[in-house]
Image (cartoon, helix red, strand yellow):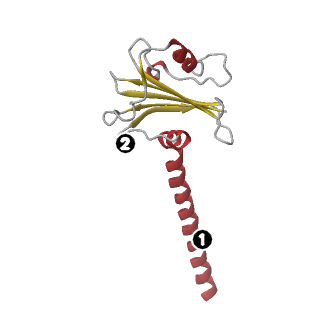
Amino acid sequence: MVKGKARQWLIIIILILVLVVLGVFYIVNKLYSAHQSLYEENWNMKFPNDMKEVYTTHGEIGFQGDGVRYSVFRCDDGTDDFLKDFKMGKSKNFEKEFQAFIGTNESAMAIDVPDKYLPDWTENYMWKKIEQHEQLDSIYMVFNQKTNELFVLERSI
């Protein structure tokens, strides 16, 4: 009889441990898969605190995190410091590079993004491009001051 009760307790303890481990993995995955955190970590930058993720997608992501990620954030406050080194005014070259990774372009890395989540290139915008690892990795950011939306496109090879 004692052996039966001990076995029941062992099974209960094992089930509780499995649930705890799964819970920890879930929380860690949520913390580290948030796109804002990924961009901040990959590019050593700090986004405004009040940003809300509106849309996110990605292409095939490789084992080492390589691929294309795309996100749209809405940021209502706290953007002044973040935007201080963004360039003002339109740039056809920047738009062309940005669009090379969106839609049905012939690029193998292109991802499909619905039009409503793309920058409105007819509006004035602020933009920034950062490259690292001998230009193999790039991040493109577009900020629409009218809508307070930040469009982020990351390409890692």
* Callout 2 amino acid: Asn
Question: Tag 1's secondary structure?
Answer: helix
Pick the front one: 108 or 4: 108
Pick the front one: 134 or 8: 134
Left or right of 109? Residue 20 is: left
Q: From the top left corner, tell me how far across and down residue 47 is, in percent.
A: 42, 39
At 54% from the left edge and 68% from the top edge, which residue is drawn? 16
At 41% from the left edge and 25% from the top edge, which residue is drawn? 143
For marks 1 and 2 on the same chain, the one whose residue lies earlier in the sequence = 1
Query: Is residue 64 shown above or below 130?
Result: below
In the rendered image, which quarter is residue 155 located in? top right
Q: From the top left corner, tell me how far across and down residue 93 is, in percent.
A: 54, 14
* Callout 1 amino acid: Ile
Identify the disc placed on residue 49. Answer: 2
In the rendered image, which quarter is residue 50 located in? top left
Query: Is residue 111 shown above or below 81?
Result: above
Q: From the top left corner, tell me how far across and down residue 157 is, in percent.
A: 67, 33
Name, please, the residue furthest toward the bottom.
2
Q: From the top left corner, tell me how far across and down residue 106 is, in percent.
A: 66, 16
At 51% from the left edge and 12% from the top edge, which residue is drawn? 92
* Residue at mark 1: 14
Task: Give how far apart the Cα atoms at labels 1 and 2 are.
Answer: 40 Å
Residue 121 visible in the shown view: yes
